[in-house]
Amino acid sequence: MRRIALKLLGFAAGLAAFIFLALQAWFYAQVLWLRNHDPAQSAFMQEQLAELRAQDPKARLQHRWVPYAQISANLKRAVVAAEDAKFLDHQGFDWEAIQKAIEKNEREGKVVSGASTISQQLAKNLFLSGERTWARKGEEALITWMLEKTLSKRRILELYLNFAQWGERIFGAEAAARHHFGVSPAALTPEQSAWLAAILPSPTRYDRGYTTRYLAGRVHTILARMPAAQIP
């Protein structure tokens, strides 16, 4: 019986390893495809749309792909300044920021700070669900590594700007610029760009022109950091 149990355990372990490797191969194939193809939706968008259509079968998201060259440098600088100042320097993970976030969370006794880079956020939004588990975080790390090894920083930022959420049903720089300011993404001013970058952590809380004292302060900080922000 013990021999049979060991054989079954070995078979189960082998099967689990095969499934894991097959899944990683599928993710890597998708990342390779992203080199020369623009996806229509992200996994996060699909999840949001499914939830909306459960209530309203005709529900739609506002989104249209726009090439990197047609997005204002102001928005690129604002997003990098707000979300990932070391974007051009790291390989997907900002270890110093992660350590600081861990220390802050330990002091507070709860999770109050994160340290996800633009690459990590893209990995999560493009491929994964919104659930928060260690397994999902591990998969996020693996996909982040794949993105960094396969795509240029320019392509990663282009994808991020096209799939970031900027409001209720608003996804991507094109929809965000049109919805919030009535302009093309190429025409966004530094102030408009800083406002869009400031709402990224909680995009559904702020609609056209809405502001708070905290948000105004955040916009001011991002504007101050934008000249030093390096973009691809």
Image (cartoon, rainbow, N blue to C red):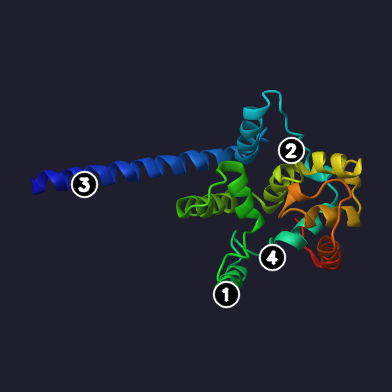
Calculate the distance from the C-alpha at mark 1 to the C-alpha at mark 3. Answer: 40 Å
Residue wearing tag 3: 9
Residue at 63% x, 52% y: name it. 121
Residue wearing tag 1: 103
Given residues 50 and 154, the one toward you in this image is: 50
Residue wearing tag 2: 169
Which is more foreground, mark 3 or mark 4? Answer: 3
Q: Earlier in the sequence, mark 1 or mark 4?
A: 4
Q: Earlier in the sequence, mark 4 or mark 2?
A: 4
Q: Quadrant of the C terminus?
A: bottom right
Crowding near pointer 4: few (<14 within 10 Å), some, many (20+)? Answer: some
Q: Earlier in the sequence, mark 3 or mark 4?
A: 3
Residue type beneath disc 3: Leu
Q: How many labels were placed on the picture?
A: 4
Where does the image place residue 202, in percent across and percent down from the top left?
A: 72, 53
Identify the residue at the far left of this view.
1
Residue type beneath disc 2: Arg
Which is more foreground, mark 1 or mark 4? Answer: 1
SS label for mark 1: helix
Residue type beneath disc 4: Lys
User: Pointer 1 and pointer 4: residues touching (CB < 8 Å)?
Assistant: no
User: Pointer 1 and pointer 2: residues touching (CB < 8 Å)?
Assistant: no
Calculate the distance from the C-alpha at mark 1 to the C-alpha at mark 4. Answer: 20 Å
User: Pointer 4 and pointer 2: residues touching (CB < 8 Å)?
Assistant: no
Residue wearing tag 4: 86
Identify the residue at the far front of this view.
55
Which is more foreground, mark 4 or mark 2? Answer: 2
Residue at 14% x, 46% y: name it. 5
Where does the image place residue 91, in percent across and percent down from the top left?
A: 59, 60
Identify the residue at the far top of this view.
58
